[in-house]
């Protein structure tokens, strides 16, 4: 993964407010939580889980947890969504519309940035699995570790 500062990560996360996120605690035995990204401020993201909002701080020099947006790859775009996007009054609205619908779109950070044109998943900020798949794989992993 190319280096992304906290400011770069927050810029990307801010485009996906309202989408599901997976939080893997690096301090708590890799506990996995899934919630909704509800906010972004200069050094943290807000995630709502079970009607509780938690601010998760991000640091450039260490990580408390792994945060991944739960997105869909563009190849899963449906004809209906493409049709709606093509009917938007301004073509510049298409990318934000796809992001709003939970599709992984190429990022733009700033001119010349090495992560431009990469998808959030390529930058290790997104996962294409569903919450059910994540929970199932996590349960299998814990069962394997217990054996």
Image (cartoon, rainbow, N blue to C red):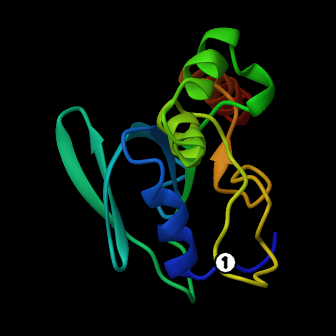
Q: Residue at x 66, y 30 (%)?
A: 72
* Residue closest to the eye, 125 or 78: 78
**Placement of the N terminus among the 4 image quadrants:** bottom right
For the image, the number of numbered tags is 1
Residue 77: where, in percent of width, then height?
70, 21
**Placement of the C terminus among the 4 image quadrants:** top right
In the image, residue 130 sits, relative to residue 28, either above or below, namely above
Residue 52: where, in percent of width, then height?
18, 42
Q: Secondary structure at mark 1?
A: loop
Q: Residues within 10 Å of mark 1 (few under 14, many from 20)?
A: some
Residue lying at the far front of the rendered structure: 89
In the image, residue 2 sits, relative to residue 70, either above or below, namely below
Quarter of the image for residue 108 reads: bottom right
Quarter of the image for residue 8 reads: bottom right
Q: Is residue 39 left or right of residue 115?
A: left
* Residue closest to the eye, 100 or 144: 100
Q: Residue at x 66, y 21 (%)?
A: 82
Q: Is residue 2 left or right of residue 126?
A: right
* Residue closest to the eye, 113 or 147: 113
Q: Residue at x 44, y 38 (%)?
A: 19
Residue lying at the far bottom of the rendered structure: 61
Residue 120: where, in percent of width, then height?
69, 53
Residue located beneath label 1 in the image: 4
Q: Residue at x 48, y 64 (%)?
A: 27
* Residue closest to the eye, 91 or 37: 91
Q: Is residue 110 left or right of residue 21?
A: right
């Amino acid at each position: 993964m190319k280096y992304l500062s906290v400011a770069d990560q927050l810029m990307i996360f801010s485009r996906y407010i309202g989408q599901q996120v997976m939080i893997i605690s690096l301090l708590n035995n890799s506990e996995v939580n899934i919630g909704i990204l509800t906010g972004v401020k200069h050094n943290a993201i807000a995630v709502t889980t079970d009607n509780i909002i938690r601010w998760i701080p991000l640091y450039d020099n260490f990580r408390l947890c792994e945060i991944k947006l739960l997105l869909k790859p563009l190849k899963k775009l449906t004809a209906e969504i493409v049709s709606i996007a093509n009917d938007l009054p301004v073509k510049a609205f298409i990318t934000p519309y796809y992001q709003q619908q939970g599709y992984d779109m190429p990022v733009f950070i700033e001119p010349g940035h090495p992560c431009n044109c990469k998808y959030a998943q390529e930058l290790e900020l997104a996962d294409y699995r569903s919450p059910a798949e994540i929970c199932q794989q996590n349960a299998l992993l814990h069962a394997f570790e217990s054996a």
